[in-house]
Image (spheres, helix red, strand yellow):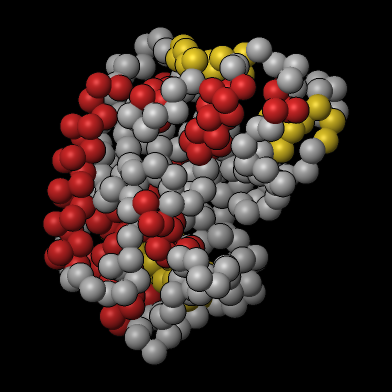
């Protein structure tokens, strides 16, 4: 028996992007094999003493979030080495009905977007395991243990389950709702709120004028959201100890809120208002795509080759395609 650690470690306490070492768990006295260190796919040696690989982890309902790709790599390894995978299903905290996003262009495949799905997939982790296994050809011996008493209309609070941080910067359910909007700012010099008490619910930079940005964004009358001007000072990450101007993304109606259109609109407005300040972060490795391309799953936003209206058309078209594609994998 052993534990396997994804990004953020087995207790969700390690910051994003920090490699997790292999170690002995003090409480359970079990070896912890890292799947976010020297390898992201279990090796033959890690699986030698294992017959069944059990996956029981809280996802947040986003293409960006790495837990579903750790699961995919586990499934690939178990197929290769003849092991069984059992997924204990858990709720999608932002609901199972709403779907939104563009289909990932595989030129921008990464650990924050490995298969051609949309940002807000509206699936449980068990459903997406079935999709990865069948639609995208993993072909492992997979069993999904379904939930009781969950339905697609539920948000996480409707389950009466306690919210346990899946990672340090998803501290509450509200964060998960805006994550699909503001996570794209990770690939820019705009702060996505890391280093504050409300990561991903705010965005800004030292050169942003909050009132002007809020007025510009509210003029779009995006459904289910209101932008409030604010100032904040991150304690770590971008602009550590610097005063930033920005907006708070208040979700006023979860049922009508469109996080991906909201995030893409925010990006377009900020780069248009602040062309002398806004920058796309360079690639970590020369010759590779940049983080903004990985996050958006395309290059037309970074290259500015499509207008915002054209971007919205792509979102509408790809959302409809994915809604139809996912139907046969839904369990509830």
Residue positioned 23% across, 32% down in the render: 325
192 in relation to 41, above or below = below
Q: Is residue 329 left or right of residue 189?
A: left
Q: Residue furthest bottom?
A: 276
Q: Can you see residue 153? A: no
Residue positioned 43% across, 85% down in the render: 277
317 in relation to 332, above or below = below
Residue positioned 33% across, 29% down in the render: 135
- Pinpoint residue 136: horizontal percent, then vertical percent: 37, 33
Q: How many marks?
A: 0
180 in relation to 288, above or below = above
Q: Can you see residue 270? A: yes
Residue positioned 21% across, 52% down in the render: 315
Q: Is residue 153 left or right of residue 288?
A: left
- Pinpoint residue 173: horizontal percent, then vertical percent: 45, 39
Q: Quadrant of residue 194?
A: bottom right
Quadrant for the N terminus in the image: top right
Instruction: Give whichever of 162, 167 is nearer the camera.
Output: 167
Quadrant for the C terminus in the image: top left
Q: Quadrant of residue 210?
A: bottom left
- Pinpoint residue 125: horizontal percent, then vertical percent: 44, 27
């Amino acid at each position: 028996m052993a534990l396997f650690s994804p990004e953020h470690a087995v207790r969700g306490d390690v910051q994003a992007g920090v490699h997790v070492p292999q170690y002995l768990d003090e409480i359970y006295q079990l070896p912890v094999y890292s799947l976010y260190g020297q390898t992201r796919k279990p090796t033959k040696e890690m699986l030698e003493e294992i017959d069944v690989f059990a996956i029981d982890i809280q996802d947040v309902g986003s293409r960006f979030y790495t837990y579903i790709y750790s699961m995919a790599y586990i499934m690939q390894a178990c197929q290769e080495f003849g092991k069984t995978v059992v997924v204990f299903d858990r709720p999608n905290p932002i609901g199972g009905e709403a779907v939104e996003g563009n289909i990932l262009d595989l030129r921008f495949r990464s650990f924050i977007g490995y298969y051609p799905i949309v940002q807000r997939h509206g699936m449980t982790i068990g459903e997406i395991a079935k999709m990865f296994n069948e639609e995208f050809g993993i072909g492992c011996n997979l069993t999904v243990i379904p939930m009781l008493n969950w339905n697609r209309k539920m948000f996480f609070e409707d389950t009466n389950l306690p919210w346990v941080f899946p990672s340090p910067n998803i501290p509450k359910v509200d964060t998960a709702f805006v994550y699909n909007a503001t996570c794209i700012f990770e690939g820019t010099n705009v702060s996505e709120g890391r280093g504050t008490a409300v990561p991903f619910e705010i965005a800004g930079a030292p050169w942003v004028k909050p009132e002007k940005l809020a007025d510009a964004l509210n003029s779009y009358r995006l459904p289910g959201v209101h932008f409030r001007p604010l100032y904040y000072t991150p304690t770590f990450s971008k602009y550590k100890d610097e005063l930033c101007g920005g907006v708070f993304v208040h979700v006023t109606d979860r049922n009508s809120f469109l996080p991906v259109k909201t995030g893409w609109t925010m990006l377009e407005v900020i780069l248009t208002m602040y062309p002398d300040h806004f920058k796309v972060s360079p690639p970590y490795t020369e010759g590779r795509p940049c983080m903004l391309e990985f996050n958006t799953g395309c290059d037309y936003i970074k290259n500015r080759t499509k207008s915002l209206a054209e971007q919205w058309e792509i979102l509408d078209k790809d959302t409809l395609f994915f809604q139809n594609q996912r139907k046969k994998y839904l369990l509830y």
